[in-house]
Image (tube, rainbow, N blue to C red):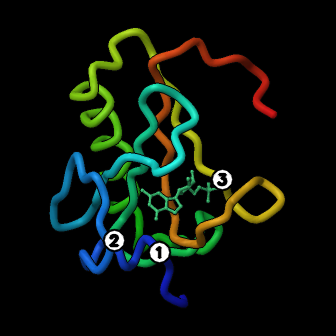
Amino acid sequence: MSDTIFGKIIRKEIPADIVYEDDLVLAFKDVNPQAPTHILAIPKKPIAKLDDATDEDLAVLGHLLLKAKQVAAEAGLTDGYRLVMNNGESAGQTVFHLHLHILGGRPLSWPPG
Ligand code: 5GP
């Protein structure tokens, strides 16, 4: 997989407002927030998109989901939040390093656009 802006954030080559980090995952505030709280949670392993994940990624993807829950709680999202993972260009993916959007702090309508 080719390098992305998120690879640069993982390596601290460019700044980001990091809210959580461990050996496997990183979470940081989205630079262009779509809700009062908009955090991105990413695996440090460079998986371009969910379609590229394999059985080898089972543990890291489970960890990512559980850490997203922790990050949401620590951000004070007690009244619900939404997790979004865009997979592919036509789904709106623009950065090809797998990521979860954690969105909250306002009512979120359904269906999404
Ligand atoms: P996607 O459209 O791929 O699902 O989401 C990519 C997200 O990354 C967008 O919400 C966009 O605002 C965010 N983003 C893109 N570049 C940067 C950056 O350099 N720093 C941060 N913090 N977020 C970024």
Residue at image coords 53%, 28%? 35
- Nearer-N-terminus badge (3/2): 2
Q: Is mark 3 within 8 Å of ligand 1?
A: yes
How packed is label 2: few (under 14 Cα within 10 Å), some, or many (20 or more)?
A: some
Query: Could you say which disc has been placed on residue 96 in the image?
Result: none
Query: Disc 3 versus disc 1: distance between alpha carbons?
Result: 16 Å
Q: Which residue is mark 1?
A: 5
Residue at image coords 31%, 52%? 27
Q: Is residue 47 above or below residue 27?
A: below
Q: Element under label 2?
A: helix
x, y percentage for residue 31? 46, 51
Query: Disc 1 versus disc 2: distance between alpha carbons?
Result: 6 Å
x, y percentage for residue 95? 59, 68
Q: Is residue 76 above or below residue 94?
A: above
Amino acid type, label 1: Ile
x, y percentage for residue 15? 29, 66
Asked whether the beta carbons under mark 3 and mark 2 sit within 8 Å of each other, the answer is no
Q: Is mark 2 within 8 Å of ligand 1?
A: yes
Q: Is residue 75 above or below residue 51?
A: above
Q: Element under label 1?
A: helix
Q: Quadrant of the C terminus?
A: top right
Asked whether the beta carbons under mark 1 and mark 2 sit within 8 Å of each other, the answer is yes
Amino acid type, label 3: Asn
x, y percentage for residue 41? 38, 52
Q: Is mark 1 within 8 Å of ligand 1?
A: yes
Amino acid type, label 2: Ile
Q: Which residue is mark 2?
A: 9
How packed is label 1: few (under 14 Cα within 10 Å), some, or many (20 or more)?
A: few
Viewer-proximal residue among 9 and 48: 9
Query: Disc 3 versus disc 2: distance between alpha carbons?
Result: 19 Å
Q: Which residue is mark 3?
A: 86
